[in-house]
Image (cartoon, helix red, strand yellow):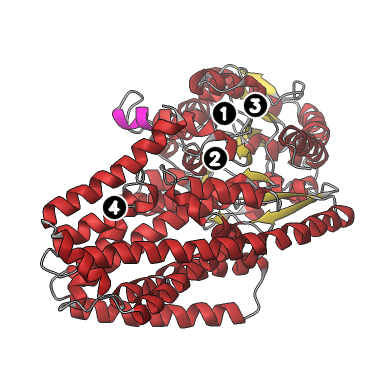
Amino acid sequence: MSRLRRLAFGYGIGGVAVIVALASMDVDWSEALAGLGTLDPTAAGLAFAAFLCHGALNACAFGALLQGFSGEARVGDGAAAWAASVLTKYVPGSVWHIVARGALLSRLGVRPAAVLATGVIEQTASLGSASMIALALLAPGAGGVLGGVAVAGVVAGIAVVAAWLVPAPPRARRARSIAAAIFLYALAMLPFAAGYLMLTSPPDVRTFLGWLFAGTASGVAVFVTPGGVGVRESVLAAALQDLPGLLAIALVARLLIVASEVVLTGVGAWRAGGARARFAGWREEAHETSNAVEVVALGVGLRGDGYPNAEGVLRSLRSIDGVAVSDRVRWLPVDIHLWRVFRGPLRERLGLAWILGSGSLRAAIEGLGAGGHVCYVPYPAVFALWWLSWVPRRFRPTVIADAYISVWDSAFRDRRRGGKEGWLARVVRRSEGRALRTATRVIVDTRANRDWMIALFSLDPERVMAWPLAIDARRLLALVRPHRARAPLRVLFVGTLVPLHGIDVVAGAIERLASNPAVEWTIVGTGQDAHLLAPVLARLPDGRVRWIRDWQDGEAVARHFRQADVALGVFGGPGKASRVLPFKVYMALAAGLPVVTQRELSLPEGVPEPPLVAVDPTPAALAQSLEELAADQEAVRRLGEAGRRFFERHLGDERRRLLWSGLVDSCVGDSGLL
């Protein structure tokens, strides 16, 4: 459709709405023209002032909202851009006001993503506040509801003013700017309503205002009409046919609103010119004083001893010269473990779903305002990425997503929940693919996992990297185990008892070595496959196997590694077990322990084969390898020392710092952020 046709279409809808309104009212034109002559000029002037105040409050609200999402402009700069471009809302499509102020703000260094985010929130706030006011006024028993709304508004206003006056850190200042903006959008409805009441004296003020705001909400919702022209008038006409002179009131009110917007346009254009010159100087000064790249960490993240990767990544980023890290992640409590929640009661699952969904939406919106920065989204990154996937690509921020394992694979295959082909599994798989395709870069843990996720989710191979996981290995690297002469081989298994780890293989090896006093066992963990282990242990003599089911923190796990001679990896066979190099293998290598694991495994990019004891994932093969190690303690010592050297060279902090430094540089270069 050509531009001229789009213009005609938009204005045509508004015209049809007005014609329908007039037809439904059975207008007496002579009476309408006579009504115009009876309007009090003083009342019209006051109404104009009220509409001007309404527009000014909306402009200030946008300025505060923009400041909350981007530190690139003052409140006055955002307000000036809003006012200078306000008349563009009468171009059909209801997006041109956003586009026009985006063009103005881009000259001040504000990125389009921040403009888009504020535009969406502005429209939502306008539609929501108008709708709630209409419902409060028109609902039965509206008097009490209206009083409650008024009291809540006063309390909210006092809270916003108080918060604004109290000194706060940058993150809190951004939050209160957004809160102030929402309050100002709602407050702007008061002079808007006052302007209409100065032009008429309806017998039922509450009903009149209720339908006025219902018409306003309809005008916002019917986005194809230019500035809601005709929609508000048609709603008023249909609902208040008995009100004399309503047509004259609606026409005069619309003309006064447009006149106030013309004044705002002039003031805004004058103010925006000065802001542009001032802001250019600020940017030049900032560029001269600092060339640091800011990495903004966003999303709902997991951390703690069970999920150490995100904190390790942030630690690596902070160690890079020229990189500043802003941690805005909503971290879940360290005692939350996804596998437990997945198997827990429905209430816990719904609670976690709400936190992940709402927190990730907030992170996505905040990411749209992180213009000029690189965003890092920790695991599980797919929730924030899914929200961002609905934003046009040109407005999305530069995002590095930590997706080292698949949520779909963990929830529906590794732990056998929902069925691989169930409807819920299909929804999650497709949603995860959509989300990951949104990221600028996707980080996974091994080469095999990279290839698998590229094929499953149709990812761009150039955007997916397989890098070592991040752990805090300082405690483990400092471990020194005492020399033990001719003592039993102490075998340690640490991990959740799930199919990935091959619990049936471990249980079978324990049973095969039940009569061998040269091998002792410590099992740390529990899970859905605990039933495979319990019967075997029940048949063994006391003291041969120690099973610790309680959750162990990092310090306790380090003690277990210190007291062990050999650590076990995974034995789940083909599938996911062959694509991962789990945290516990990293930990064992750092602690200087030999690792016995299945032969089929995968590694990060650029990492050579580690000094592991590789076996077939069968009870017989595992039992045989442990008997051989129990008979050769010198080999145990050599393997442990080689493993620690391997970790420090290929999986440690320095290797990770170099990788992330190169990635940040490449993202900055590709996106033109500097």
312 to 652, vertically: above or below: below
- Looking at numbered disc 2 in the image, what kind of residue is underneath it? Gly
Calculate the distance from the C-alpha at mark 4 to the C-alpha at mark 3.
Answer: 49 Å
Q: Residue at x 60, y 69 (%)?
A: 172
Q: Mark 3 = which residue? A: 463
Q: Are marks 1 and 2 in contact (CB under 8 Å)?
A: yes
Calculate the distance from the C-alpha at mark 1 to the C-alpha at mark 3.
Answer: 29 Å
Between disc 1 and disc 2, whose residue precedes? Answer: 2
In the image, 390: left or right of 172? Answer: left
- What's drawn in magenta, residue-wise? 423-428
Q: Are marks 2 and 3 in contact (CB under 8 Å)?
A: no
Calculate the distance from the C-alpha at mark 4 to the C-alpha at mark 2.
Answer: 65 Å
Q: Are marks 4 and 1 in contact (CB under 8 Å)?
A: no
- Looking at numbered disc 4 in the image, what kind of residue is underneath it? Gly
Q: Mark 1 = which residue? A: 570
Calculate the distance from the C-alpha at mark 4 to the C-alpha at mark 1.
Answer: 68 Å
Rendered-image quadrant of the N terminus: top left
Q: Mark 2 = which residue? A: 495
Between disc 4 and disc 3, whose residue precedes? Answer: 4
Instruction: Decide whether residue 392 is among the magenta residues.
Output: no
**Residue depth check, mark 4 versus mark 1: number of the one nearer the observer:** 4
Q: Residues within 10 Å of mark 3 (few under 14, many from 20)?
A: some
Between disc 2 and disc 3, whose residue precedes? Answer: 3
Between disc 4 and disc 2, whose residue precedes? Answer: 4
Calculate the distance from the C-alpha at mark 2 to the C-alpha at mark 3.
Answer: 31 Å
Q: Mark 4 = which residue? A: 230
34 to 498, vertically: above or below: below
